[in-house]
Each structure stands twice: as structure tokens, then as C-alpha cells.
Amino acid sequence: MRRLHIQFYLAILATLVVFAVCSALFLGLAGHVRVNPSGAEYAARLAQTLLPPDGAPAAQQQKTMRELHENLDADMALYDRGGRLIGATENMPAISASRLGARGWAFVHGDAFWVLPLQDGRRLVVRHHSMHPSVGWHVFVVPIAIVLAFALGAYPIARRLTRRLARLQSGVEQLGRGDLATRVPVEGRDEVAALARSFNQSAERIGELMQAQKLLLANCSHELRTPLARIRLGIERLADGADGATRTELARSIAELDALIGEMLLASRLDALKTLDRTEDLDLLALAAEEAAYFDRSVEGRPVIVRGDPALLRRLVRNLLDNARRHGGGATRVFVRGDAGRAELIVEDRGPGVAAADRERLFEPFYRVEVPTSTERGFGLGLSISRQIARAHGGDITCLPVESGSRFLVSLPAVAAG
């Protein structure tokens, strides 16, 4: 497997190599045109004053050019009016006069030549050594130095970036092995840091869910023992002939066990619920009035339309009313109102109230506050399920302090108020 930091590093180096090659080629091409015209023209004009006249013998002209070459260290050639070569120095390449032009610079086969027309019609062509294109090893020194500098500086940067990804990968592997306490350090403010932060939040959420699941299973095992023990005792009595009280107790235990299983299944389904299975517009006032009728209670307020699952919202209202019946002697007031795009359902009772430290814990699964005036002992799941339902509908439920008794406030998004 190719490491990500190696891929980053190779990509950077490849870019720098291309840069170095292009730079070297550019410097090499620039060497072809980096000439000194003033020096070459000076040599050509000086040669014009020293050359024999146009009618002088060719050997004399050749001898003069050889002397100029030795004194001036310049390669040159002399052409007559018709472009025929009169003479040239030893290292001067043979070039057709038609390719040199009448005056000025001419570039042939990568060499630079200065063409100077003489007054008698001849043309003197000079190639000075300073004009020779020279692309040696020194042209590559600067690009190679740049590549080496970047190579040394880029590796720590690439390694630092991918080292954080490697730590994130290690954290994912540890979490996959069951270590729910795994967290990765959040370094920097870039995308990798955001990814590490998201991983930590996800790991924390998974840990909370697993802890809640363990707590649910532990409480379920505890709660199931009581009805199961009663059922076992009742079955033992059946062997000797059961009376009516035993049969009644056995039926009650079975019903209690069935209700507990139903509560647990609903709590698990709500915990895994991403979207509501069924939604429709509902009048919260009418829905609350229908449920309150089973508890011989009336509902005050005005109609407020909410959107949600009718069965779940009925269960929410029923749980609140049943909680008030069990622990508060029954609901004393049920009120529905709409305010600022929210629908609110309030259920009050005249029970002993709830201490400030217990108001939030009331909504934990299987948490129960011992109330001396309670007529029945519940499972501790009713309020927890009610909060799950409210949050599944985009709302929430809270326990508010009052002078006497308890007040539960359900807040839901309102569609419209009538």
C-alpha cells in the first residue's frame, strides 16, 4: 500500500523536476541570444580599416584576416559584392551569404553572427567567442538547488499532514475493536482537524448509546425478575389447585410483563427512529381532549395544528396523564396553547412535586422518584418515552417548578393556530 504522504511528496517532487527541466531549457535557449553586439561591431569596424582594398589579392586578404583573428580572438569571414566567400578564419563555419542577410545579427545553426557591410560592397561576418552559445552544467545548478531545497522542506510538511490522518485511522481501528473511550487529538483548523472533531463527536455519541443500551438491558433484567417470580410462584400453586386470587395475581403479572415488554420495544424503536413512519396534520387540543376523557379530565385552551404521528402523540399525552394519576393524584389542569410558531401542552398535578436535582433525571429510562402518595408503581419508562416522542417530532418536554405539585410542558412545532 502506498502511503499518502509518499504520494504527496512524489507529486511535489515531480512538479519541481518539471520546473527544473523547463528552467534549464529556458536558460539554455536564452544563452543563444545573450550576445554583446557593441563588442562585435567594434571588431568589425576595426577590421574594415585594416583589411586590404577590394582589388587586393585573395592571399593578402586571407593573411590580414588571420592576423585579425589572432589579435582580436574572433572568427570571421569576408564576402565580395556577389556573395562569394573571399576568405575565412580556420574555425569559421562555411555559411552561404544568402543566409546571413545584409546587416545586423544573423543566427545560423544555433550560432550568432554580426554582418557588417563595408563601403566597397564587401561584407564582413564576425563570430566572436563571447557570442558562442554555452549551455554547461552550471545552467542546472540553480534548478537542482531549488529541487533539493523543496525536497528537504516538503517532506516534513507532507508527513505532518498524513501523520494526523494515520492517528485518525488508528483511532477508527481502536473504536472498531470496541474501545469506546478512544479519542483522537484535534490539531489545526483545517479539514483534517474537522474530521478528527467529527470522529470524536461520533465516538462520544456511540459511547452514550452503548451505555444507554447497557443500562436498559440491566434495568430490564431487574424489572423482569418481579413478574417472572410471581408467575413462577403462581404456577407452583397451580399444582395444588389454584384459587381465584392466585389466578388473578398470575394474570396481573402476565399483563405487567407484557406491558413492560411493550414499553421496552417502543423505547428501542424510538431510539433507532430516524424519520416518522406516518405524519399528518392534527389538532393538538382535540387529541389531548380525547385522551383526557379516559382519565375523566377536561382540556382547556384553543386549537393548535401540529404535524406528526397520531399514535405516538396520543401515547405522549397518555403517558403524561397516567404519570399524573400514579404520582400526583390525577391531573388538575390540562392546557393547550400556541405561541410564536410553537404548540404547547401543559399537564399539572397536585402531587408532592419534584426536587430540582431530579427534574431532568425523571426522563432517564427506569428512573423513579419514590413518592409516598403513589397509588401504583410504574416501570420508569413513561416519561422517557414521552421525551423521545417529543424530540422525534422536533420538540421537547421539560418538568417545570411550581408552588405545589408538578408541571410538565411539551413544546412542538406548530403548523397553524385556529
Image: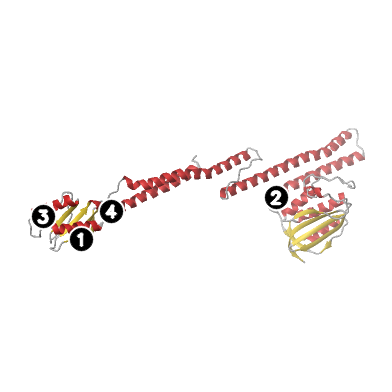
Question: Label 3's element?
Answer: helix
Q: Amino acid at mark 4?
A: His
User: Regarding mark 4 in the picture, which secondary structure is present there?
Assistant: helix
Residue neighbourhood size for the residue with mark 4, other residues' Cα within 10 Å, grouped as few (<14), some (14–19), many (≥20): some
Q: Nearer the viewer, residue 9 or 226?
A: 9
The percent position of residue 369, horizontal first and vertical second, equals: 84, 46
Distance from Cα at disc 1 to Cα at disc 2: 89 Å
In the picture, measured across the screen, residue 194 lies left or right of residue 150, that is right
N-terminal label among 1 and 4? 4
* Residue that mark 2 sits on: 273
Cβ atoms under marks 3 and 1 closer than 8 Å: no
Are there few (<14), some (14-19), or many (20+) residues within 10 Å of tag 3? Answer: many
Q: Is residue 274 visible?
A: yes
Q: Residue furthest bottom?
A: 418
The CA span between labels 1 and 4 is: 18 Å
At 73% from the left edge and 49% from the top edge, which residue is drawn?
270
**Relative to 121, does residue 229 appear above or below in the rendering?**
above
Residue drawn at the location 76% of the way across and 57% of the way down: 411
> Badge 4 is on which residue?
32
Decide which of tag 3 and tag 4 comes sooner along the chain: 4
Q: Position of residue 342 (x, y in %)?
A: 75, 61
**Are the residues flagged by discs 3 and 2 in contact, CB closer than 8 Å?**
no
**Residue 330 position in % (x across, y down):** 88, 53
